[in-house]
Every structure is written in C-alpha cells, then in structure tokens.
C-alpha cells in the first residue's frame, strides 16, 4: 500500500460529529470527483455519481451520505477501460445518489473545522503524498483554476503556503517542504500518518546532519594532511639546499621534529618542544620555514635569516 493510500485509509474512518463538517467534506468529494447525470428513469430528476479508484474514499463518501441525508444510494464496481496500460484492470468504485442535495452545492465553508473537513475531502478525492523516504511532495489535482485557488486560500489560513502549477489540462496545488506537509497532515487530522512522516523526516535529517559533519571533518582532515605534506616538502628543500645549520635554533628544532613526526598535529608537536610551545607558536614557525623555502626557490640562497625571520645579506654578517 502506498503512503497516500495509507493516509486515505486512515482518513476514511474519521466521520465528523458535526453535520456542517460532514457537509463540507461531502462538498469537497463531490467537487473533485463527481458529475451530474440525467437519470434514465422518468420523474427521477438528476443524480450525482461519484467515482474513485480508492475503496477507502468510496466507503467514506457512502458513510458521510448515509449519516447526513436520507436518500437512496447505490454502489457499483467496474474495471477501468482506460487505454493507458498502467490503469487497465484497475477497479473503479461508483457511488450514485438520488435525492435533494442542493445544500451541498451551495454550502458556505466559514468555520475552521469545516475548512479542515473540506481540505480532507479534497485530498481524499484527488490528492496524493509521495513516500517520505523518497522525497517530500503533496499535491491535489484540480479541474479548474478557481478550485485550486480556493484550496490555496484555505491552506494559507492555516499557515501553509501552497503553490499552483499546471499539468496538461489540470491545475495542481502542491507543497514540497517537509514541515508544511506535516502541517497539512495535522490539518486533515491524519495523526498516524503524521507520526510516520515525522519519524522518517527526523531520521533523514539526522543522516544528513551526520553526513555533513563527516564531510566537514574529512575536508578538514584533507586540509591538514595537505598542509603537513607542504610543510615537509619545504623543510626537505631547506635541508637539501642550505641545511638546518643555517637556520635559527628554534626553526631548526621544529624542522627536524616535523620530519620525524609527519602525521603529528601542531598541538602535539608543540608539546614535544623544550620548552613546550602552543599550536599558534608552532604554526608561526612552520610558516617562517615555508617563507624561507619559497625564497630559496627564488634563488635567494645567499640570504641569512635571523631568529625573528628578518633577512640579511651575507656581506652584512660579522
């Protein structure tokens, strides 16, 4: 069973206690999956036929009518005759009603409880929600723009900002934000589906958070390794060109230690020095070594570097 079917099955068992809410839900179902047709028998007037592929929706509509109106109803099941192979063999449930139902057609939905019922009925009739494991997408298919706009205004009254787009000849009201889909499930009072959706959403967010943290730590590790490799290359170049004897004692000490401990962190390197030096102090000395290496690469081997990193020509030395 799809996630949409699970939601509709849950909603099919919710029968509003108030008659005005039942009327609102009936109005929505009729508005989104029914049509008026002339009865074949004389003197019977017009009838309403609601058709759906979902048994839960047919059962809900039948129950709402039975509890709200004293009218004659009939239920039939037939196989779909659609040319689309994916719909061939699908069962179509039809609920036909005969009687005075003018109140449904002209109902005014003003109360918040009635708006909840209407949104619930619209979803039952032509809505769907994607599996939260795969993505977040809620939609209701509307035959006319004014129906889509009416639903959008209702949802906006509950703080849900839905969008409207077109698909072939239909108008699609949709929501793609997970938190807003949770709000819609709450509006429709699909509390079991809401908890399932939230559990999946929380797990996905936790996985995403862990992945972001791992990616961040991996990036930092790669950055640290790259920096260590560059430091060692610079130190080896200094050793090969002028040797460590030409370096100030503190720079020679950290250069030798870095070669012996290529995988050690800056903090750990500082603790190995005598006296111990902090991470920033170690980083400062390694930067000076990198500067020396760059200058040597620029053919400035004759420069002398004092303990502070200042440069002096050989001719100026005593």
Image (cartoon, helix red, strand yellow):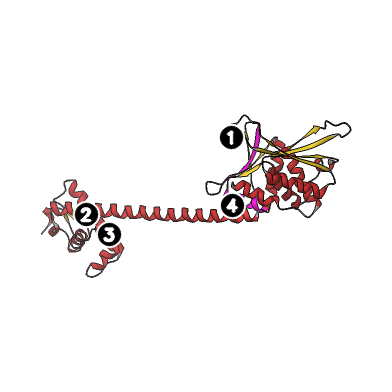
Q: Earlier in the sequence, mark 2 or mark 3?
A: 2
Disc 1: CA contacts within 10 A as few (<14), some (14-19) or many (>=20): few
Q: Earlier in the sequence, mark 1 or mark 2?
A: 1
Q: Earlier in the sequence, mark 4 or mark 1?
A: 1
Q: Helix or strand or loop: what does disc 4 sit on? A: helix
Disc 3: CA contacts within 10 A as few (<14), some (14-19) or many (>=20): few
The residue stretch that appears in magenta: 169-186
Where does the image place residue 82, in percent across and percent down from the top left?
Answer: 64, 31
Q: How far apart are the two marked residues, 1 and 2, measured between alpha carbons?
A: 65 Å
Q: Earlier in the sequence, mark 3 or mark 1?
A: 1
Residue 184 located within the stretch drawn in magenta = yes
Q: Which residue is mark 4?
A: 179
Question: Quarter holding the C terminus?
Answer: bottom left
Where does the image place residue 48, in percent across and percent down from the top left?
Answer: 79, 37
Q: Is residue 201 above or below residue 44?
A: below
Mark 2 vs mark 3: in front: 2
Q: Which mark is residue 201?
A: none
Query: Residue at horizontal 72%, vertical 46%?
Result: 59
Mark 2 vs mark 4: in front: 4
Q: Which residue is mark 3?
A: 284
Q: How far apart are the two marked residues, 3 and 4, measured between alpha carbons?
A: 48 Å
Q: Nearer the viewer, residue 58 or 284?
A: 58
Query: Residue at horizontal 28%, vertical 65%?
Result: 268
Q: How far apart are the two marked residues, 3 and 1, measured between alpha carbons?
A: 69 Å
Q: How far apart are the two marked residues, 2 and 4, measured between alpha carbons?
A: 50 Å
Where does the image place residue 115, in percent across and percent down from the top left?
Answer: 74, 49
Where does the image place residue 103, in percent across and percent down from the top left?
Answer: 84, 43
Q: Which residue is mark 1?
A: 86
Q: Helix or strand or loop: what does disc 3 sit on? A: helix
Q: Are marks 2 and 3 in contact (CB under 8 Å)?
A: no
Q: Mark yes or no: residue 118 visible.
A: no
Q: Which mark is residue 232?
A: 2
């Amino acid at each position: 069973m799809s996630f949409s079917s699970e939601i509709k099955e849950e909603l099919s068992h919710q029968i509003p206690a108030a008659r005005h809410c039942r009327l609102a839900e009936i109005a929505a179902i009729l508005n989104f999956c029914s049509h008026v047709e002339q009865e074949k028998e004389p003197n019977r007037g017009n009838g309403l036929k609601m058709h759906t592929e979902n048994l839960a929706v047919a059962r809900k509509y039948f129950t709402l009518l039975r509890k709200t109106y004293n009218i004659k109803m009939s239920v039939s099941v037939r196989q779909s005759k659609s040319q689309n192979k994916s719909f061939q063999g699908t069962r179509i449930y039809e609920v036909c009603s005969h009687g005075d139902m003018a109140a449904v057609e002209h109902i005014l939905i003003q109360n918040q409880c009635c708006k909840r019922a209407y949104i619930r009925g619209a979803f039952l009739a032509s809505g769907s929600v994607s599996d939260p494991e795969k993505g977040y997408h809620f939609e209701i298919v509307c035959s006319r723009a004014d129906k889509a706009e009416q639903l959008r205004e209702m949802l906006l009254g509950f703080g849900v900002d839905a969008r409207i787009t077109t698909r072939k000849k239909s108008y699609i009201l949709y929501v793609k934000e997970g938190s807003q889909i949770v709000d819609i499930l709450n509006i429709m009072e699909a509390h079991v589906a809401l908890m399932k959706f939230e559990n999946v959403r929380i797990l996905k967010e936790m996985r995403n958070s862990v992945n972001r943290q791992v990616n961040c730590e991996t990036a930092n590790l790669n950055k640290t390794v790259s920096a260590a490799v560059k430091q060692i290359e610079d130190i080896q170049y200094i050793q090969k060109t002028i040797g460590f004897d030409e370096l100030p004692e503190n720079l020679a000490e950290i250069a030798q230690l870095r070669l012996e401990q290529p995988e050690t962190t800056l903090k750990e390197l500082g603790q190995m020095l005598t006296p111990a030096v902090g991470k920033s102090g170690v980083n400062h000395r390694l930067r000076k070594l990198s500067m020396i290496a760059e200058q040597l690469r620029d053919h400035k081997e004759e420069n002398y570097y004092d303990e502070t990193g200042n440069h002096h020509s050989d001719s100026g030395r005593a």
